[in-house]
Amino acid sequence: MKIAVCVSHVPDTAAKINIGSDGKNIDANGVTFVVNPYDEFAIEEALKTKEKLGGETVAISLGGDANKETLRKALAMGIDNAVLLKDESYRDSLSVARALAEEIKAQGAELVFCGKQSVDHDNSIVGQLTAELLGYNCISVAVSFSFDGSKINCEREIEGGKEIVETTLPAVITTQKGLNEPRYASLKGIMSAKKKEIIEKLPVAANNYIEVRSMKKPMGKQAGKILGSDATVVPELIRLLREEAKVI
Amino acid sequence: MSNKILVYIEQRNGQVKKSSLEAAKVGSNMALKLAGSVEALAIGNSIEGLEDLGKYGVSKVTHLKNKELANYSSSAYSSLIAKFINENIFNIAVFSASALGKDLAPYVSVKIDAGLAMDCVALNFENEEIIATRPVYAGKALVDLKINSAKKVYALRPNVFNPGTLTDAKAEINVIEIDPPNLNVKVTDLKKSEGKLDVAEADIIVSGGRGMKGPEHFHLVEELASTLGGAVGASRAVVDAGWRPHSEQVGQTGKTVSPNLYVALGISGAIQHLAGMRSSKYIVAVNKDKDAPIFQIADYGIVGDIFEIVPSMIEEIKKIK
Ligand SMILES: Cc1cc2nc3c(=O)[nH]c(=O)nc-3n(C[C@H](O)[C@H](O)[C@H](O)COP(=O)(O)OP(=O)(O)OC[C@H]3O[C@@H](n4cnc5c(N)ncnc54)[C@H](O)[C@@H]3O)c2cc1C
Ligand SMILES: Nc1ncnc2c1ncn2[C@@H]1O[C@H](COP(=O)(O)O)[C@@H](O)[C@H]1O
């Protein structure tokens, strides 16, 4: 069985975000990029599934040359092959998904793992869009995954609990924290990843339906009042919450 | 072309979700602004409370009914919604960006060939066009965007769109019994987290961080939360330490919340934590370090010891409740 993992290359979550001169994107100067944290769960689950059931794994990333760093990380963790769909231009989620779907089809992968969300634009939709374009079944935000070769069972996180969801191949699963503990790349893994070829392809062209007009910083919340330093100010706090904020 | 707007109404256990009522009000407002019409669609077995949608300005509701549809099935629900949209020529669909809406809206958008704006926090109208605002980089920035495809789908972040004043109109409900649908992907069971209120849906959240010193002290956080009728949240530090479940984690890799009141106890306010809660309407912080970054966004702060302050807060609130 061929297993695909889609990985995105995103600013580190600790990065300070400044708006770039075009007013539509971030200023990437000085920003460290990393593999999207949720995609590490996707990589781990692909590796575990291969270890259990056999097969071959491929990581796919759409973006510029910088994304090779994230693909190398996937290879170092143990993914067999890597494909860069090279495109530096702006693509909305649907056009990213069209390119991923095309490549997944070309690879003949029947099981696909994506992260539940890319921590750049936080859309949390590319996995579902890709599945729908392929006509695959999809379970999003999985915190558990089991596959016996025919039936897939997942727990999916929802408000106040979990849904137990059942489906079959072909399928896309989007991964949430809690699913597994991503492994560290071994030294041997890192060395052999350096030697592996990352296959570059041009992604299929697709129209953007979403036009970003502008990017801005949120209105800074003002630092409020420090009421004091001991329990004597608690009655005043409760009064403010009741009378000024009117929230209790 | 006149705009035809469809609002998808989510039910769980046969009850209409609050975030769907917010979506209904946004849909009816959109119809006013764009000189269009609005209707609602719900899917399930028996559903209570659909006539209340009238109060939110939606007078016509279709309920697609089958006993197999009581539980969510993404394959069945998305096919039914797309078919309904295409047959009735809607050009705008509105969802809530709830757990279900985040799953469902993307499938529907592909099936009807629409652009999708997920997790919108504001919609503005400019010359008959909708400009949607959504947070990116965990709320460290916002983008304004326009959907350029003929059909458009918007999913709205829960708890952000205040429905405002309601009327006492009743919606007309059209129940249609349908054939058993395609259940390729099906929810077979539900596990509740011990009957507790979830941070993603709470109006008040009380969160504890590493300053709580250990899981054995979280009864203070729980008691303050229950006195206020709120939910318990946590920083990642305490989730990673195994003191609290991941479902309670607030922040960039946890849940993004915007309650009316957020109380941070012994939380330093790391950038990833702030990302998940900075849009809360009021923030209270208790921390013994006056330089903790949480104070930079707190409306009310107490620079003190949680083990002294929190019991006193519980006592004072009990006096007024
Ligand atoms: C990729 C990535 C993603 C992350 N995602 C998240 C996320 O989603 N959510 C999140 O929360 N974090 C996240 N983090 C972690 C984040 O960087 C911080 O490490 C974490 O938020 C710190 O938790 P804390 O505030 O509880 O602990 P600390 O930073 O240790 O703060 C404890 C605070 O308690 C105070 N304190 C101690 N004792 C008392 C007392 N008796 N009375 C009053 N105050 C006291 C201290 O002054 C201190 O300010 C992420 C980090 C990374 C790298
Ligand atoms: N450019 C990309 N290349 C490869 N995979 C991607 C890309 N963008 C998003 N994905 C995948 O889709 C998931 C959800 O992304 P998003 O919908 O952008 O939040 C990510 O966790 C990745 O697995």
Image: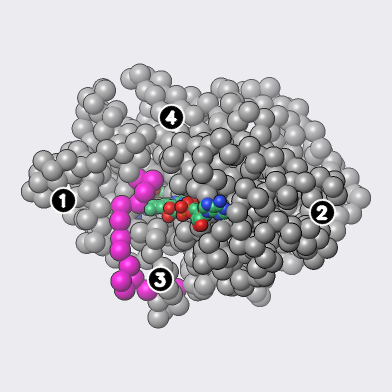
SS for callout 3 = loop
In the rendered structure, which amino acid carries the disc numbered 1? Ile
Say if the magenta span includes residue A28. Answer: yes
**The N terminus of chain A is located in which quarter?**
top left
Q: Is mark 3 within 8 Å of ligand 2?
A: no
SS for callout 2 = loop
In the rendered structure, which amino acid carries the disc numbered 4? Ser
Provide residue B115's location: percent of width, then percent of height: 52, 56
SS for callout 1 = strand
Above or below, A218 relative to A166: below
The structure residue drawn at horizontal position 43% and vertical position 41%, both measured from the top left corner, is B240
Looking at the image, is mark 2 or mark 3 nearer the viewer? 3
In the rendered structure, which amino acid carries the disc numbered 3? Ile
Tag 1 near tag 3, CB within 8 Å:
no
Looking at the image, is mark 1 or mark 3 nearer the viewer? 3
Provide residue B107's location: percent of width, then percent of height: 51, 43
Picture quadrant where residue A134 is located: top left
| Residue linked to disc 4 | A144
CA gap between label 1 and label 3 equals 27 Å
The structure residue drawn at horizontal position 90% and vertical position 49%, both measured from the top left corner, is B169
Which mark is on residue B57?
2
Q: Which residues are magenta?
A: A24-39
CA gap between label 2 and label 4 equals 40 Å
The structure residue drawn at horizontal position 57% and vertical position 72%, both measured from the top left corner, is A220
CA gap between label 4 and label 3 equals 34 Å
| Residue linked to disc 3 | A26
